[in-house]
Every structure is written in structure tokens, then in C-alpha cells.
Image (cartoon, coloured by chain):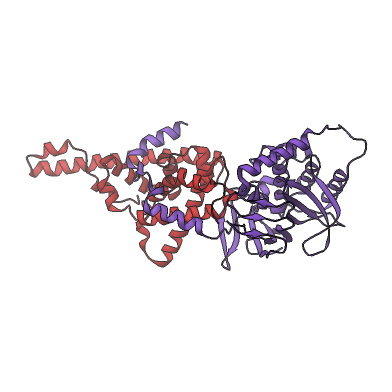
Chain colours: A purple, B red
Amino acid sequence: MNDLHEVRRVMAPADPCPPGAFDGAAHDPAGRAAYERITASAARRPGPSRRTTFRLVAAGGVAGALIAGAVVATSDGKPHHPAPAAPTETQQVLNVAATFALKQPFTAPRPGQWVYTETRYWRSHMPGKGTVVKPGSPLRKTVDRIWVREDGSRMASYEHGRLVTSSTGGAIPPTDYATVSKLPTDPDGMLAWARRQPAPGGGNGGVFSLLGSLLLNNGALPPAQTAAAYRAMAKIPGVNVDRASKDGAGRKAVSVSFLIEGWAKEEILLDPSTYAYKGHRTTVVEDHAMPDGGRFLKGAVESYSVRLAAGVVDRPGQRP
Amino acid sequence: MPDPDGGFTRLWDAHYDDVLRYAARRIDHDTARDIAAETFLVAWRRRGDIPPDRPFPWLLNVARNVLANEMRSRRRRTRLWDRLRGDGPRAPAADVASGLAEGGRIAAALDRLSARDREVLRLVGWDGLDARDAAIATGCSVKTFSVRLHRARRRLTAALAEIDARAETDARAETDARAETDARAETDAGRPAPAAPLQRSPQA
């Protein structure tokens, strides 16, 4: 504290740009022009956090949030029978997934190593004013190759074919091994942690999405935290499972899902034999109008992803 | 794609000026505009990654990298290195000359410190960050930053003391020299040494 005040006092006279200089620059002609250029640029997001659901929730705005509240209130308002004798289908499936996760061999990254996550995404466009995303609407396919240093200090990805390393500002949920390996390993602790995170939309949907993103964005989530995430999901009211689901390519998959805001079904997809995490899918189950006039029609796929590879490597650019 | 929830616009309104000031403290003003814009472009593309509770140090961390990239490519491309405030062989003359005498004295002291010490002092002294935010901006732990700040402050104090001592010696030498030839020496001797001698040897 003393250092702070003293340094400020000593340094102030030499500040080449004292407070007040450039005030209002955000809205002067140069500032306005920069703002327009940036917000008009493609919504490409090379960052490691792919919050597909959050994209929906954010776009849904206040109306969406209100609907979410209603759904949560309904599902929470049901009389809750404590400690049912037999576990539900959801609990069974997620319990098996957790047990399988704990049995997986896992090698933690050593200091200085990098975690590689390669994911293929299919995304619809965001319907703008007067446009519609409907079943069969074309999806844009991208492959994300992301390296995050185990301590979370750096990340690397390809931009225009070039490997670019930059520092990370952290993400929600976290995408670095140092942070995720310290998350709670018990389901209640994991659930409480997820509820504390600032999730747009909030409620049970926000918590489900957050845990889904934790699985999606972390190629080296330790078994204990993976299991805790599955078991925490099992404790969220409104989570459903479908053992006979199919992934985007028509292969069999186990689906764990939550209906976000009453119109977007968010799923995590698991391998039917190993219960390993395979990817996500967000499907429109009810026609939905966005605040700016665009619409999602029932049956449209908003996005889905398939994890292609994940593992620990020595340097960015390397594949496991 | 427009800014659906207004989050980016709020970020722009709240922090653009500060990010621009951060850049302008380290590079010429034209380039500072580019650095600020590039920083917000990264923020726009990575909106989902911005910690909602502390966006400003996150932005500065990005700005730091944008600035470092700019300097790297500049070093390769040209020798415009010395446009960088305080990080070149010597600070731009205009800074020192136009600053107050006190500013020149501190700029000279900063010149003698390592780049890391300088950056630690600037983040706290000029950009107004506390230890926690500065740690995020520099990508280290709060504890590490506090230690660095403490040491940098000590070295700044030492550099200032050294400069003051030299200024005094110079002033005295000047006085002595003039006293022999100039009868008006006494009136000049009372004034502190001007900024010029301080710039003589930044690499002590």
C-alpha cells in the first residue's frame, strides 16, 4: 500500500499523459471510426471459450432472461421429493459417465507444457433483421486448434494460417490447467462453484451451460473434476438424458440436455460405449424471435461441435 | 454482427480513453490510437473471455501484447524504436524538454532502470492500477507484482538520489568554474541544475 501511494506521488509529475488527456476520445471522430470498424468486423472469436449457449442467451436479451426465469421457477416450483429410492435415468447416466471418467488414464501437464484442444464447430449464422434460421439452414464449419499453456499465461491458435501466441485474459469457465485442476472435486462443491460464476441468463440453464463449456473447452480436465462436473449436472433440476440420441454425423450418442429459455435445447454428447465427452449441440425446439427481428425456427440447429483431439504437448503448434 | 447485449459498447465507453492513455504513455500518439483500436478488436473477438468483474486490467494485458507485437515488428522493419517513450536509447527530447523540471528528473531516473522496473512503476504511478489489477495486466501473481513494485520503488529512489547528487556536483563544478571568470556566478549558483546534464548518461 505504502509503495502504491509513494510511487504514485513520485511518478505523477512525469506522467506524459495525465488524467484528462484524451478524455472523450472514445467518441471523437477517430474513436467513432475505430468503433464502427471493429463492430462491423466478422464475429470471429479465436478465443478459447466457445460459449455457444451464451451467444444465444446474450442475444435473447431481457425477454429471454424472463422466459428463463419462468422455466426455472416452474421446474423449481414442483414439489421436490427428497432422496428418491431409485436414482433417476439422468443420475444413472451421469454417474456412469463420472465413473468412466475416473478410470481414464490421465497425465497432468508439467510446468511449461501446453494443453491442446481441437474441436470442429458447425454454426448457423445469427439471424439478423428479417432473416430466419430454419431446419436445413447451412452451417458454417470451422476447426479450432487451441493451445493453452498449463499455467494459463499464454494461448496459441492459428490466425490466417499463422500460429499466433498471445496472452490470455482468463475465461469463464477457465480454460487453463492450473485453474481447472483446482476446481472442487465433489459434486456439491462443483455445483456451488458453477453457481457463483457470472453466467449470462443465470439460473439452472446458465449452470448447465457453464459446466458443459468447462468440458468442451478443456482438453485436459482432470478425471476428478470431470467426474464432479457430471455429478454436479445430475443435481441440476431440469436436466434430461437420452441414451438413444445421435450426433450431427448420425452416429449413436448419449445426450445430456437442458432446455434453455424454453426454446434452445443445449446438449452435451457422450460416447455410447465409453461415455467420453464428444461435443455439444444446440437445437431450436420452439420458434424464437430475436430482439432485432431475426428468427430461429423450430428444428433448426444453432450449432454443434465434435472434439477431434485433445492432449498435452511441449510447445504450441505440436499435436498430441 | 452488431453488439447484441450492448456489453461491448459499454466496455468501449468505460475504458477506451484509459486504454488510449495507457498506449500514449508508451508510444507516439498516432500509433497509440492504433494500439487502442487493435486492443478493442481483440476484445470484440474474444467478448466471451472478458472477465466481467475486472475488464480493465484484462484490456491492458491485451494492450500490452499488442504494443509488444508492434514494437517487435517495428524493430524488424525500421529503427523507429526510439519513438517508444522511455524505452529507446533515450527518451524523446520533447518529453523531457516540455515537461517540468521535476518531470525531467523523474524521466531521467526511469531511464536508468530496467524495462521491467519502468513498466511496474508506470502501471501503478501513471495508469493508476492497484497491485491486483496490475498483476492481471502483467500476467503475474499479486504477490510477485508487489515484490517487483517494492524493488522498483527502491531502485527509483536510488536513481533519483544519484541524479540529485550528480546535479549538485555539476552545479558546484559549474559554479567553481564560473567563479574564476564570471563575477555573476553567485546568482546562477542558487538555481538547481537544468535538465540537460541529467540526460548525459542514462546508461550508468
Q: Residue furthest right?
A: A85
Please identify the residue farthest to the bottom as the structure is shown: A161
User: Which is more toward the observer, B154 or B139?
Assistant: B139
Residue A81 visible: yes
Q: Picture coordinates of residue A320 (x, y %)?
A: 72, 63
Tally of numbered discs: 0
In the image, taking residue A240 as reference, residue A21 lies left or right, namely left
- Where residue A261 sits in the image (x, y, percent)? 70, 45
Estimate the x, y position of residue A224 in percent, counting from the top left. Answer: 78, 45
Quadrant, the N terminus of chain B: bottom right
Name the residue: 61% across, 59% down.
A131
Q: Quadrant of residue A250?
A: bottom right
Q: Is residue A83 left or right of residue B191?
A: right
Residue furthest out toward the front: A130
Using the image, determine if residue B33 lies above or below residue A13.
below
Of A56 and B19, nearer the camera is A56
Q: Look at 27% across and 42% down and name the residue there.
A: B166
Residue at image position (77%, 41%) is A185
Return the residue nearer the eye: B13 or A165. B13
Q: Is residue A277 above or below residue B173?
A: below
- Is residue A62 positioned above or below A106 on the image? above
Residue A277 appears left or right of A202: right
Q: Position of residue B3 (x, y in %)?
A: 54, 51
Kindly tell me whether residue A200 is visible in this rendering: no
Quarter occupied by residue A273: bottom right
Q: Residue at x 67, y 37 (%)?
A: A196
- Quadrant of res A105: bottom right
Q: Nearer the viewer, residue B90 or A264?
A: A264
